């Protein structure tokens, strides 16, 4: 790539409303968000890399399901959401704002400040108590990933956990509680995230949810056969409900058994291209899963985000297409979730 293209793509990248739909935080300790440290995503790297909006997740690992572990998971999710909320401040010349509506995200972009969107990863965080979802929403959470690795009370995961005595399938998709949780999420204006769920869970969630479902971090099974990736029928189902798949930067989802240094922005863009050709530009977006396993040669931190824009530009995506991929499509689903809430 010559310098002129590089300069142009960087300028164009910075002018977009760029959103990464899935970022983990260090827990319980680690470098702070305003420190330019060893996290893949901190606020200085977001600013340097022209990444305006990040969905930061309160992630709870799956454990054996007992009332005690469920209470502990709920407490952890609340504490993590509270920590994410403390990112909304000004420090070292950088301002970040907690945003939990599309209007707030757009206002932050207009004001040229970084936007933090809280979210929760793993429905295990609510245990079997639906009222806990409102507590997450009250702390700004805009989506719930229904499962992580391992089945929970809501749904089957695409990665059953033999160490937790998971059968290949437990509920045959969503449980009755899972269906009620989807209805409650719809009521609260939280998006239903189907990353990590089984194929049956995903297809059922698409059917049951009153608003389009999203996968905040998954890739394409036709290009890389991995349980976390979506097959063509799943992609079609996502399109049929107006949902979005946020292609993610996890090396082993992008290329079979690959390590981070064996994957490039071209591999990532291949997954974007495939999804766009199969189900349309409006159904595709971008995520990193940084600090949760994401990152490959060329996109190892939020500071390198413009490399993705450069690769997509080279493939013919214009400004409008890049705006859609980098956040426009995800925000469309978020807006529908807001409109249909209540
Ligand atoms: Zn995940």
Image (spheres, rainbow, N blue to C red):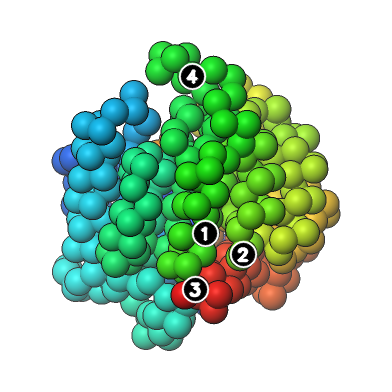
The local crowd at label 4, few if under 14, some if 14 to 19, many if 20 or more residues have their Cα within 10 Å, is some
List the residue tagged with mark 4.
166
Say which element carries label 4.
Answer: loop
Is residue 272 depicted above or below 219 in this figure?
A: below
Q: Picture coordinates of residue 185 (x, y %)?
A: 47, 60
Are the residues tagged 1 and 2 within 8 Å (C-beta)?
A: yes
Is residue 235 depicted above or below 167 in this figure?
A: below
Are the residues tagged 3 and 2 within 8 Å (C-beta)?
A: no
The residue depicted at 23 percent of the width and 52 percent of the height is 78
Q: Does residue 108 appear in this view?
A: yes
Q: Picture coordinates of residue 148 (x, y %)?
A: 45, 36
List the residue tagged with mark 3.
341
Are the residues tagged 4 and 3 within 8 Å (C-beta)?
A: no
Please tell me whether mark 3 or mark 1 is closer to you in this view.
1
Q: Picture coordinates of residue 316 (x, y %)?
A: 77, 63
Among numbered discs 1 and 2, the one appearing first in the sequence: 1
Among numbered discs 3 and 1, the one appearing first in the sequence: 1
Q: CA distance from mark 1 to mark 2?
A: 8 Å
List the residue tagged with mark 2.
210
The local crowd at label 2, few if under 14, some if 14 to 19, many if 20 or more residues have their Cα within 10 Å, is some
Among numbered discs 4 and 2, the one appearing first in the sequence: 4
Q: Does residue 5 appear in this view?
A: no
Q: Is mark 2 within 8 Å of ligand 1?
A: no
List the residue tagged with mark 1.
183
Front-lying residue, 263 or 234: 234
Say which element carries label 3.
Answer: loop
The residue depicted at 69 percent of the width and 45 percent of the height is 203
């Amino acid at each position: 790539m010559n310098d002129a293209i590089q300069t142009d793509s960087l300028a164009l990248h910075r002018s977009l409303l760029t959103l990464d739909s899935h970022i983990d935080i260090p827990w319980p300790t680690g470098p702070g968000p305003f420190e330019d440290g060893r996290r893949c995503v901190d606020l200085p790297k977001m600013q340097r890399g022209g990444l305006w909006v990040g969905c930061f997740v309160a992630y709870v690992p799956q454990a054996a399901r007992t009332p005690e572990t469920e209470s502990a998971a709920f407490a952890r999710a609340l504490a993590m959401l509270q920590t994410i909320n403390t990112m909304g401040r000004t420090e070292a010349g950088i301002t970040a704002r907690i945003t939990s509506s599309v209007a707030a995200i757009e206002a932050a972009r207009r004001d040229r400040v970084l936007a933090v969107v809280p979210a929760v990863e793993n429905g295990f965080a609510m245990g079997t108590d639906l009222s806990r979802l409102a507590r997450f929403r009250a702390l700004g959470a805009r989506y719930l990933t229904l499962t992580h690795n391992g089945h929970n009370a809501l749904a089957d995961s695409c990665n059953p956990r033999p160490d937790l005595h998971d059968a290949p399938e437990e509920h045959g998709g969503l449980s009755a509680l899972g269906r009620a949780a989807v209805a409650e999420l719809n009521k609260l204006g939280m998006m239903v995230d189907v990353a990590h769920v089984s194929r049956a869970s995903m297809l059922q969630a698409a059917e049951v949810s009153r608003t389009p479902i999203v996968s905040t971090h998954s890739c394409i099974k036709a290009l890389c056969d991995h349980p976390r990736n979506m097959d063509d029928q799943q992609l079609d189902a996502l399109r049929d409900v107006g949902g979005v798949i946020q292609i993610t930067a996890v090396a082993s989802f992008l290329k079979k058994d690959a390590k981070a240094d064996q994957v490039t922005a071209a591999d990532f863009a291949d997954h974007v291209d495939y999804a766009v050709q199969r189900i349309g530009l409006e159904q595709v977006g971008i995520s990193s899963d940084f600090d949760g396993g994401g990152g490959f040669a060329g996109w190892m931190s939020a500071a390198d985000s413009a490399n993705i824009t450069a690769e997509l530009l080279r493939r013919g995506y214009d400004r409008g297409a890049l705006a859609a991929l980098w956040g426009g499509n995800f925000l469309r689903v978020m807006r529908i979730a807001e409109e249909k809430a209540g």
